[in-house]
Image (cartoon, rainbow, N blue to C red):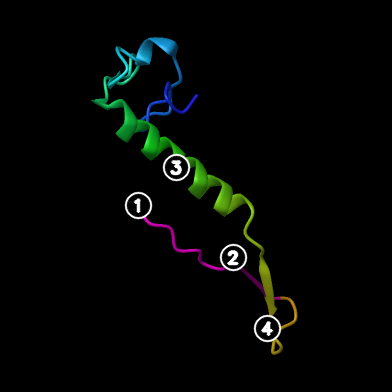
Amino acid sequence: NTSRECSNCHHIAKANRKSQAIFSCVKCGHSENADHNAAKVIAFRAKQMASVNRPIAVHVDSSNADVLELQAPSIPLSG
């Protein structure tokens, strides 16, 4: 469905594809080259997957065992 999903509002509809080359969202009105829109959708999904699958490191403050600091390592993604 990347070819039918809006990179702006993420609404998915068959009607979003006006032609093979043109994407135009029926919900928000976003319009651009269909391949560019699909590439942005794929990049968005990759970032979503990266944020879901990142390991979490736990740091315990030795001066106060009641304080925990959770940190997810940063994964640089272009875009």
Q: What stretch is highlighted in magenta?
A: 67-79
Answer left or right for 46 relative to 22.
right
Q: Which of 74 and 20 is in front in this view?
A: 20
Whether residue 70 is in magenta: the answer is: yes
Q: Nearer the viewer, residue 3 or 20?
A: 20
Pointer 1 with pointer 2, Cβ within 8 A: no
Mark 4 surroundings within 10 Å by alpha-carbon count, few (fewer than 14), some (14 through 19), many (20 or more): few
Pointer 2 with pointer 3, Cβ within 8 A: no
Callout in the foreground (4, 1): 1
Pointer 4 with pointer 1, Cβ within 8 A: no
- Residue 72 position within the rendered picture, expressed as x and y whole percent measured from the top left: 59, 65
Marked residue nearer the N-terminal end (3 or 4): 3
Q: Mark 2 points at which residue?
A: 72
The residue under label 2 is which amino acid type? Ala
Marked residue nearer the N-terminal end (1 or 3): 3
The residue under label 1 is which amino acid type? Gly
Element type at mark 4: loop
Marked residue nearer the N-terminal end (1 or 2): 2
Marks 3 and 4, how far apart at CA = 35 Å
Callout in the foreground (4, 2): 2
Element type at mark 2: loop
Answer left or right for 12 relative to 78.
right
The residue under label 4 is which amino acid type? Asp
Marked residue nearer the N-terminal end (4 or 2): 4
The label number, if any, that marks residue 79 in the structure image: 1
Q: Nearer the viewer, residue 9 or 77?
A: 77
Check the image and report above or below for 47 versus 71: above
**Based on the displayed image, in which of its 4 quarters is residue 9 positioned?**
top left
Callout in the foreground (1, 2): 1
